[in-house]
Structures are given as C-alpha cells and as structure tokens.
C-alpha cells in the first residue's frame, strides 16, 4: 500500500508520519495517521538518518515538509529549500529539501512548520470552512503562518510573525533574549523570555503570576497588528506556553482594550481559540502539502 509522508521538522524534535487520504477533494475526508515517530533534532546527518530509517519501510506517494526556520521558500531562488539563518547549531545554510529529494524521487512540498499547522487547522481544524486565518505558536520561539484567500501567505519569503517589534510593558524591565531585535515578540514573550525574566520555568508559575499579565499584553499587541493587516476570520494560538488556558481570556481582554473600539472583530471567544487538532496540526498540514504535491 502507498502512503503520504509528513515531516514536521522542529528545532527541538522531528515528527515523521505516514498516512492515508480517501477523499476526492482535500478537506472532505480526514487524513488517517497510520504510524508516527518522533526523535530529537541533533545534527542534520543524525536526524535525517532517522527520517530515512522510518520512511524506507513504506512505499511513498509524496512527502510534505514543515520546517523550523528561517527557510527559503522562494522557488526561483538558488537556495530554495534551505534552512538559512537559524541559530540552531549545524543547521544554518543547510539544503534540507535537497537532502530529501536526493533520497526520494517523489513529489515534495516544503514550507514552515507554522504554515503547515495553519494549513492543517484551516482544512480540518478550528478554521475549517474559512478562507482566512492566522496560526501562532508560542513556545521555545514564536512563529506564525497565515492563510489569505485560501492560500498560504508568502512573498519573497515566509512571514516571520514572531519578530515584530512590540511596546514594552511599563512594569517590565527585561530587555528580551532575541539576539537580533531584543524587544520583538519572541524576545519578550517566548518561553525562554519568561524563564530568564523570573528565573523559573514558565510551567511552574502560578496562574495569577505577573508573567501571564505581561504575556497577555505582548501577545495582544501582536494579534492587534495581525488583525489590522490581515483581517483574519480566526486566530489560533498553539504551542507550549498557550497550554496555560487562563491566557486566552487575558489576551482577549487586553486585545479589546488595545483596540479601544476602533475595529469590530468577530466574537472574541470564538475568534481567538486553541488549535482543534492539538499537536497534530502541523502533521495534518504536512499531509495536505503532500497531497497537493501529488496532485500538481
């Protein structure tokens, strides 16, 4: 039997899966995940050896890849398919797509891991039936993907939503850990920023800790910018930090205050939501990418 392959390539771990799809059109039937493995992201050589060990067991129709970045998604570029200026040791300027293509002569599709998650949620998750949505993951880093008029948003590159500049909270003296921008969203609101600011891992903080007030303040600023620019029909917030469920109501409250009545959004309870597909969002998105590659 032939399968679609999915590679969710994260900076911390890789998740590889194979699955089937029986629908006549993408979205009419759910992908079924047949088998899945995960392993730490080490060097490209070690990591890809494990990728190949997994996929070599199966006959593959196509593979969809959602990768940590920054990556080159411009198909006219000489470095298309590369992981580019990542701080992840050993992976900078690595021809990721080329390594997969050299191993498997099948259709491939390549985008960011957050784009893949956005696609999964738009086709089969919290934004199903909508043409415009934003997916933001808040964890070790912050990244975002957008679906605009039914297609992934891209231009000369992919969106880098985690690196927009935000206004520091008056009570916050932390300068941010991003080596490029300091007070960008990622520098002030990703998991490492919480730990470096307060000296304790985020998941160990009480729900009413000041950390979450600061977090909601920064994320609400970012969401307001995304809303003003992209006018999405749904905003989906995933990642380890967003497992703090109290953040959703706090972010909605901060967003309403920041907007100050300027724009009329959909009901915030149904507008800013967690991923319906949970940890499967990017895996499902990569299956959809694989199906698109096979169809094209």
Image: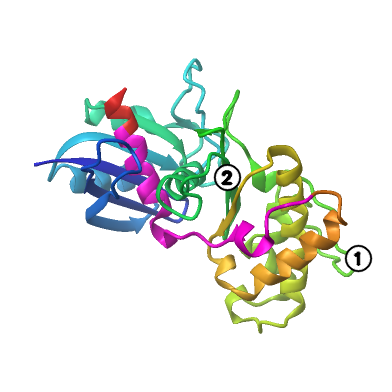
The image shows residue 252 at horizontal and vertical percentages of 72, 64
The residue at the far left in this view is: 1
The answer to whether residue 270 is magenta is: yes
Circle 1 or circle 2, nearest the eye: 2
- The CA span between labels 1 and 2 is 31 Å
Residue placed under numbered mark 1 in the picture = 170
Q: Is residue 291 visible?
A: yes
In this view, the residue in front, 213 or 100, is 213
Which color scheme is applied?
rainbow
In this view, the residue in front, 262 or 146, is 262
Q: Which residues are magenta?
A: 264-291
- Magenta segment's dominant SS is helix
Residue drawn 60% across the image and 81% down it: 204
The answer to whether residue 207 is magenta is: no
In this view, the residue in front, 172 or 89, is 172
Residue drawn 69% across the image and 76% down it: 199
The image shows residue 95 at horizontal and vertical percentages of 41, 29
Residue placed under numbered mark 2 in the picture = 133
In the displayed structure, 67 sits above or below 106; it is below
Q: Quadrant of the C terminus?
A: top left
Residue drawn 35% across the image and 27% down it: 98
Determine the secondary structure under disc 2. strand
Say which label, 1 or 2, has the lower sequence index.
2
Quadrant of residue 242 within the rendered picture = bottom right
Q: Is residue 168 visible?
A: no
Determine the secondary structure under disc 1. loop
Quadrant of residue 246 within the rendered picture = bottom right
């Amino acid at each position: 039997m032939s399968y679609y392959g999915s590679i969710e390539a994260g900076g911390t771990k890789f998740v590889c899966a194979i699955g089937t799809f029986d629908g006549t059109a993408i979205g009419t039937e759910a992908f079924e995940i047949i088998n899945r493995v995960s392993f730490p992201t080490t060097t490209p050589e070690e990591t890809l050896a494990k990728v190949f060990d997994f996929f070599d067991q199966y006959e593959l129709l196509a593979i969809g890849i959602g990768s940590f970045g920054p990556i080159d998604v411009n198909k006219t570029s000489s470095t298309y398919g590369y992981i580019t200026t990542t701080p992840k040791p050993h992976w900078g300027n690595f021809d990721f797509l080329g390594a997969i293509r050299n191993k498997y002569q099948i259709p491939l599709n390549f985008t960011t891991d957050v784009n893949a998650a956005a696609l999964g949620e738009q086709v089969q998750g919290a934004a199903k039936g909508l043409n415009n949505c934003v997916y933001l993951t808040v964890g070790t880093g912050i990244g975002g993907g957008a679906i605009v008029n039914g297609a992934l948003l891209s231009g000369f590159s992919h969106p880098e939503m985690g690196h927009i500049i935000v206004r520091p909270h008056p009570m916050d003296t932390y300068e941010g850990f991003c080596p490029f921008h300091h007070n960008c969203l990622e520098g002030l609101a990703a998991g490492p920023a919480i730990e470096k600011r307060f000296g304790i891992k985020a998941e160990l903080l009480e729900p009413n800790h000041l950390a979450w007030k600061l977090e909601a303040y920064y994320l609400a600023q970012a969401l307001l910018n995304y809303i003003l620019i992209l006018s999405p029909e749904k905003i989906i917030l995933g990642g380890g930090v967003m497992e703090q469920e109290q953040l959703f109501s706090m972010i909605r409250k901060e967003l309403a205050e920041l907007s100050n009545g300027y724009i009329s959004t959909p009901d915030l309870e149904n507008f800013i939501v967690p991923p319906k597909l949970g940890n499967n969002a990017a895996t499902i998105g990569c299956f959809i990418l694989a199906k698109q590659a096979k169809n094209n």
